[in-house]
Amino acid sequence: MSDTGSVRGSEFVRRIQVLGKERGVETRWAAHRGKGSHGLLYYGSRITTVRNLKDEVDKRAYHNMLKQLGLSEKDFE
């Protein structure tokens, strides 16, 4: 997952959900109501916003989302 240039929002959400299941942490995806393609990803008591699930996540946003969830890239290795 180090190659963040090819990680789409949907893949990021899926990997967080798998990691949560492995660690026994509750995860939940909540798409926003109304217009827009943003949604909230809950990982335990932490929350991050994921933009469009179909778009690639840029490197800075990827690291910021991990930080908001209390995770690092090492958690995916």
Image: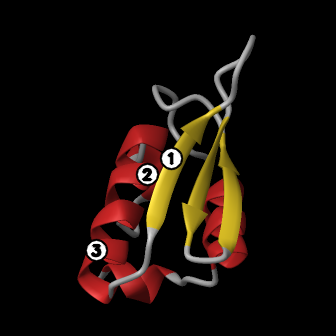
Q: Which mark is residue 21?
A: 3
Residue at 48%, 41% in the rendered image = 9
Residue at 40%, 85% in the rendered image = 75
Near-viewer residue (37 or 59): 37
Q: Quadrant of residue 38?
A: top right
Near-viewer residue (44 or 1): 44
Residue at 64%, 68% in the rendered image = 63
**Residue at image mark 1:** 29
Mark 2 and mark 1 in contact (Cβ < 8 Å)?
A: yes
Q: Give the secondary structure at mark 1.
A: strand
Q: Give the secondary structure at mark 2.
A: helix
Q: CA distance from mark 1 to mark 2?
A: 8 Å
Q: Give the secondary structure at mark 3.
A: helix
**Residue at image mark 2:** 13
Characterize the local packing of mark 2: few (<14), some (14-19) or many (20 or more) Cα atoms within 10 angstroms.
Answer: some
In the shown orientation, is residue 13 left or right of residue 24?
right
Q: CA distance from mark 3 to mark 2?
A: 12 Å
Q: CA distance from mark 1 to mark 3?
A: 14 Å
